[in-house]
Amino acid sequence: MLMQIDDPIVSRFVFHPRQEPLSHRLVGISTKTTSSGETIGGYLHLHPESGVLMVFFHGNGEIAADYDDLSRLYVSCGVSFWVVDYRGYGKSSGTPSYTKMFTDAEAIFQDIEKIQRVSRRSFDQVVVMGRSLGSASAIFLAATHPERLSALLLDSPFAYAPALIRRLNGPELSAGALYGFEDNIDWIKSIEQHCLIIHGTQDWIIPISESKTLYEACPSQKKKLVKIDGAGHNDLLILGTDTYFAEIKALIESIKRG
């Protein structure tokens, strides 16, 4: 029997869920999205004026609450910042798996209207951003909802899920097990929106060659690849803070201008 990408053995290498601490102090607006009977948690951090919403999918070792302090930096770029979890992460129920990420991403997208009602805000433009593992959810949504999502932003993304799983010391998946599977490299080929990719040149977890592959495959005429010299996978924001947020802010301002 072929091992599938949603096999629990594979998931143990891909996902590292942890619960939100009971002592967590609420920052922002707590959100709950229902997806196939499970609850997906998140936090919405509002910009005082902007009509742009950023939906953010984090890395596999993070939770939405980790972005409490960082949220102000994203908001300063001119967006309301909605960071969401995966199943089993933070305050979310269920057990994560690779394809369930896309089911949950779609449910989160469909919840934008509810988020507007809860926050009493109207978002005339929506962008989606994914970091590391979160790049899969972000690319998927941008590819499947081009009419609603104005831009795709990626932080240290990967092009090929099977290669990522192997780098995480997981099992090798056969071609038969992946029959019909659509990877990041497949979805990116339909992206016509603004596309910003940021990656560290010394990233050994997901090498920058993955971003170069995605960039070259993306047909958008409004794409940009930003390299943060000397940065690895987990110190990108530390070593490239100014460049990172300046690039995001520039993209958001460009979208606002039309």
Image (cartoon, grey):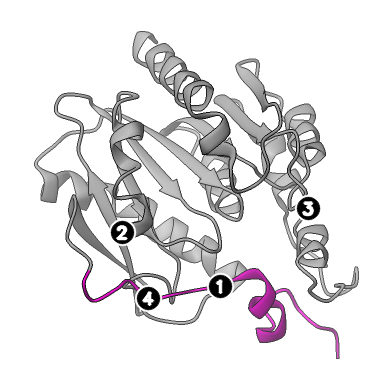
Disc marking residue 42: 2
The first of marks 1 and 2 along the sequence is 1
Spatial CA distance of label 1 from label 2 is: 17 Å
The mark total stands at 4
The first of marks 2 and 4 along the sequence is 4
Q: Are marks 2 and 3 in contact (CB under 8 Å)?
A: no
Which residue is labeled 3 in the image? Answer: 160
Q: Secondary structure at mark 2?
A: strand
Q: Are marks 1 and 2 in contact (CB under 8 Å)?
A: no
Q: Amino acid under label 4?
A: Gln
Looking at the picture, does residue 112 appear above or below residue 51?
below
Which residue is labeled 1 in the image? Answer: 16
User: Which residue is depicted at the point 19% across and 53% down?
Assistant: 27
The first of marks 2 and 3 along the sequence is 2
User: Which residue is depicted at the point 31% across and 41% down?
Assistant: 71
In this image, 87 relative to 46: left or right? Answer: right
Spatial CA distance of label 2 from label 4 is: 12 Å
Q: Which residues are magenta?
A: 1-23
In this image, 182 relative to 249: left or right? Answer: right
Q: Quadrant of the C terminus?
A: top left
Q: Position of residue 80 (x, y in %)?
A: 27, 35
